Structures are given as structure tokens and as C-alpha cells.
Amino acid sequence: MNNLSIKNVNKLNYPYLIYTNKISFKGNYKFSKSELGTDAVYTNWDNPKLPDTNDKDDVKLTILHMNDNHGQTKPLMKLKSALIKLAENIKSPDKDFIRIHSGDFYMGKNPKELNFIVSLLNNLFDFVTIGNHDLDLGTKILENSLVKTKFNTLSSNLILPKNSNLEKVRGPRIIKINGHEYGLIGISPPDLKERSSKFTLFEGLDVLTENKTVEKIKEEVKELENKGINKIILPSHGSLKLDKKIAKSVDGIDIILGGHSHELLDPLETEESIVNSPNGDPVLLFQEGQNGEYFGVIDAVFNKNGIIKYAKAGQEKSDNFELDKKALKLENKIFGESPIIGNIADNYSASDIKTQENPIANFITDSMRKIANADIAIYPSFSLRNDFKKGNVTERDVWKAIPSSGLSVINITGQDIIDLLAAGAKTYTNPNKRPGIMHASGLKYTISKDASVTDIKLLKNNTYEEPINPKKIYRVAIDSYLLKAAEDFASVTGKKEIEIPDDINNCAKATIKNIQEYQKENKKITMKMDGRIEILAEDPNKGQKTPRASMTMEEAIYNDFKPKLTNTLKQLGPKLLKDPYKFLWTPENPTLGYCYLASELLYHYIVPNKEDYKPMIIKFDNGTTHWFLQNRHNGNILDLTEEQFSKLNSPIKLPYEKAKNTGFLTKEPSKNAQILAKLLGLSK
């Protein structure tokens, strides 16, 4: 493995960020590829090691970081394997090591699951912050689960009920490693109650407001400094916006390890993740996405005054590691082996679910509508927490993807439905992509350029033809959270529920039943998109960095062929490449330059469903533009040139047949693609 980063990139594209002192850092970022002898160097690519330092007062620290795994246990079990595999790189006699989780380790309504997750955290982390979902089962149950933990729980801005077992989470902590002292302060989200169900049992627990949280942190930093602590870390479940506010408002903090806003934040990027404090010292911000898909590794060197001189950081994909066998054995002992209920035909991703029609969400809503015998089903994008992988699927896999979604049936007007869809469409006016669009079955709708909802048609006789009637009453299957949520879903909040059998009172149960029916007919589960949600509005983050949750071509190919493809291309070298791609190839990163041939392999040899791609244009921060076709089924992306893209006539719902014969996407694979396919043992 190439150090601690998933980014195997051409170094020319990732220059060092250099500053020489506080003044030049404070508002004068300087990029360079050659001035490596200056006082401080930050890099976000996998440089083999930090610059050597002979200063005896320097302190080296490595941090392992995760946030927002939302009750997903597999990432935690894989993290345990990762710690073993990466021990050489992470642990070193001359480096201190701290493991931190920034909250929302849990999500759901199963106390047994919470206790299992806490037992995993015991062997993985030194410090853990409390997030909003960690309270899904109520304050007392969380208190009881944390009584015998080995890790330290941090949350300085919680207001605790009397005689609470959570009292130990208050106040800053000091940890001493190899004679070096570090101060840690944790915070929970100030919008804790707003982001929770109205039925969450807070049982006297409350939280400070955002401004009071900032003031509380200032007090605790000062308390630490008065004790001689000059290296301070803040595990935060407050959101990137709040983390930046804290970094710019509070002197003395060196590193903020964030969560809550689910950002897959590029480490050590200027402005986004490096902020100067009021006195000009650097504050490094980190956040590793959501659902445990990634974890971060940060290396930092502090000078004798506690200022970071050097830093290097990377993010690892949890799926790159095996499940820890001991953890898996414990899981099976606690829960029993989960029965296989069906077989998934392909890999299906939840990465774009907040802003796009999604095949998994379509399958869930179709299951809800069918099982509940409803006219319409509605499911919020924020409720889906995991992908579905190709191959056998178990009941537990479904519960992991849909951890806390009750299913309710209500009778509501067409206008109530319109208002609920409109509440989701507000996502396109919010850079945080909240609350996420509403996914539906039994109807189709359009989100217009101004983020309004139009053209709502009901499904009749397998076609979307009947306009919704605002005054008519419809039987709707809905995620129960929408009836109880603190967020603004006023059109359905508090609506009276129709009694339904217990075996279908959950979206996961409905999905399991539907999968089982496929299994009875010996059918594989195919999840498709059919154009039921048309998006004309622009992404609220247009012009900003493309989220790496979108699958690149190299990652798509890597899913099934990573070891074989990499080894083959290492041996092959740049022989099959033409200018201008030949110069990109290196032995360390042999896939660079091969993206077009990889796309041909994906289309001609690998992707089973070729009929449904959509065109995409993405502008990157460096000013370059890329043109793609994205598979609507699994998210895989095919590279195109601008000329090839222009031949598509860019309809949003592009039948694949129209793209087959355009430029690069030929009817038959090119000669070089055929050579590469033969080397890989692929056949059509």
C-alpha cells in the first residue's frame, strides 16, 4: 500500500502549500513545488514522509479519525483490520498516536446494536464525541451503554440532567503520551434537538446554543493553557460551518476533527480545511464523509510552542480492508447469522441520493407502496445509509441500509403531497444539500430551475399520465420520521396513522418482503431508474469541488479488478497510450492515462446494464472541465472528450443507443482495448 492515502495521483497536480511565518500564513497563501526548505510544509498527497526535523523539542503526532458511521458496523470492523495492516505506518516509536471518533457512531432503535457498537469502539478509539443520532434510543439508554467504556467520551456543550451518568463527558481532557501532553475538548451539535425526532427521549438533557458553545470552548482552551497545554485538539460534531467559526474565533486550537455535516473534506486544502486563528496560527480541519466509508490519518509535527510546523494527511476507504474476524465472530454470537434473502444483480450506490433520482430509493419506495397497498410511497433521501453490493443480500444488510425508518400509512390530500415534495426540493437552494429530495413511487415529478416542484403525474396502467389532484385524498406509505421530525415537513407532521400489521411497519421490513418475493421466483434484484424525478435545478454546490463520493473511472474498475488491473498495467507500462496521456503514466500510479481504455472495458466487458446512461459535465477547481456518461444503475462514470460529448445532443434522459456510435463509445472495443481485455482475461 502506498503510505496512508487513497489518492494515488500525479504529484504535479497536488503542489505543496508553504508558509514561512504567521504573517505570510494569515491571508497570503503561497503555492510552490520547489521551496521545500521553508519553515512549514503541508501536503494532501502521499508524500513518503514528513521533512526530517532535528529539533529535539519537536513533537510528532499521528491521529486516526472517523465520524458519522451512523450505526454501520462493517466500517468499524474493517477499521480494526486497517489498524493492524497500517500499524507500521501509523505507529512509530518516535510518534505519539491518538484515535478519535467525532460522533454519530450509532443510529437506530436497537439497544443490542448500540451495545455491540460500543464494544467495537472500546478497541478502536481513545476519544469519542456524542452526536445527535447517538441519542436515538434516549439519554438513559446511552448513559447505561457508556458506563464501562474504555474510551473517553467528550461533550463540553451538553447540559446534563441531575445525577446523570454522562457527567464524565464534561470538561476538557488531558492525555500524556511519551511525556507529551495534549488537551482535548469535544462538542455535540447545537442543533441537536432540531435534528432529532420529536419522540427522542432527551430526559432532561439539553445543549448550549452555537454562540454559547463557542464561548464555552474559549473558556476550556484557556483552562488547558493555564495548565501548560499548548497542543489542543477539538473533536466536533458541530458541522463544518461551526468548525470554521470556532477556528476563526478561538486562539489555541490546532486541529478540529469534524462531523455532522457529512463533508468528505479534502485534507490540507487552502481555505476549506486550513484556517487561521485570530492570532494567525494555523488550524487544520478534517472530516471524513459519512456512513464510515472513509477514515482519515493525519501526521503532524508541533514545535516547542505547540504550533504545527509540518502536516500530512490522507483518507482511506474502509472497503479496502477485510472484516476483522474476531469482531465478525462476536457479531454473529450476539445477533446470530443473518439469513440470505436474495441476490443483488449489481453494485448500487447511495452517493447521490440527496440530489438525484436513485435506484436504491426507487426499489425501497416501490416496496413500500406494494407491501402497504398504497397509491403513493414517499421516502426521504436522508434515511438511506448504505449501498447495496452485488451478490447475496441478508436481512441484516437491509437493516444496515435502512436503520431507523418506520413505515406509516396515512390518508392525505394531493396538496399535502405537493408541499412535502416541495420541502425536499429546497435542497437545491441549500449548499448543505439539506434536507435532501423526496423519493417516491406511484408518481413522477420535476424540480424546476427555481427549485419549485412541477408536473406531478400519478402512475396509472404503467404510465405517468394522471395529474395529481390537490383536493383528492390519497393513501400514502411514508417514512414515519417525516410524521415526527423536528425539521420542516409541516404538511405531514402529526398526521393520523392508519393501523397496519407489525410485519410491515418498517421500510426495511417492506423491502425485505419484496426481496423475498423476488427470491421465490428465483429472480435477481435489479434496481433501476425510470425518470420518475426530473431535475432541472442546478446543484447548490455548482462550481465547488466535486464530491469524491462520485465514482471515478479508476475506482469503478477497481471495484472488481483492482489488483489484476494494477499489476497488468505495471507490467504493460504506457505502451498502449497515445499523447497526451502517455506522460501521465508512472509505475506508482499505472492507471493514470488509461481512463479511456478503462471506460471501454467498463462498457464492453463489465457493465451488465448498458441501456441507461446520463450525460454529466463537471468543472474542477483547477479550471478543467470533464465530460462523462454516468450509469444510472451503479454510478459508474465513462470519460468522454468535449467533441464526443457534443455529439450526444445532451438530452438529460439519454437512451444508451444514441451514445453507442459517438466517437469513443464505438460499437466494438478498440484494438488497444481488446489487447488490454485479453491480458485481463475479460470476454464479451
Image (cartoon, rainbow, N blue to C red):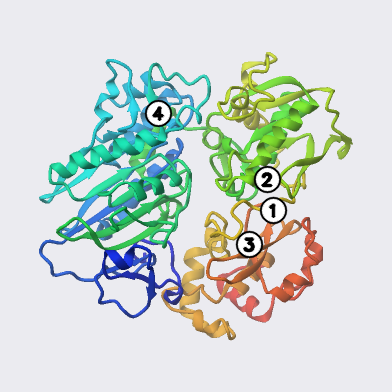
Disc 3 to disc 2, C-alpha distance: 16 Å
Q: Are marks 2 and 1 in contact (CB under 8 Å)?
A: yes
User: Based on the displayed image, in which of its 4 quarters is residue 507 positioned?
Assistant: top right
Residue hosting label 1:
632
Residue 627 is situated, as x and y percent measured from the top left of the image, at: 66, 68
Q: Which residue is mark 4?
A: 114
Q: Earlier in the sequence, mark 2 or mark 4?
A: 4
Tell me which amino acid carries mark 1: Arg
Q: Is residue 52 visible?
A: yes
Could you tell me which secondary element the residue under label 4 belongs to? helix
Task: Say whether marks 1 and 3 touch (CB < 8 Å).
Answer: no
Question: Residue 312: horizontal and vertical position, in percent?
Answer: 32, 63
Q: What separation in Å lies between label 3 and label 4 (alpha carbons)?
A: 37 Å
Where residue 52 appears, as percent x and y from the top left, is 20, 71
Horizontally, residue 139 falls left or right of residue 583, namely left
Can see residue 515? no
The quadrant where residue 498 appears: top right
- Residue position for label 3: 637
Identify the secondary structure beneath mark 2: helix
Give the camera-side residue of 300 and 208. 208
Give the residue type at disc 2: Pro
Q: Which residue is mark 2?
A: 359
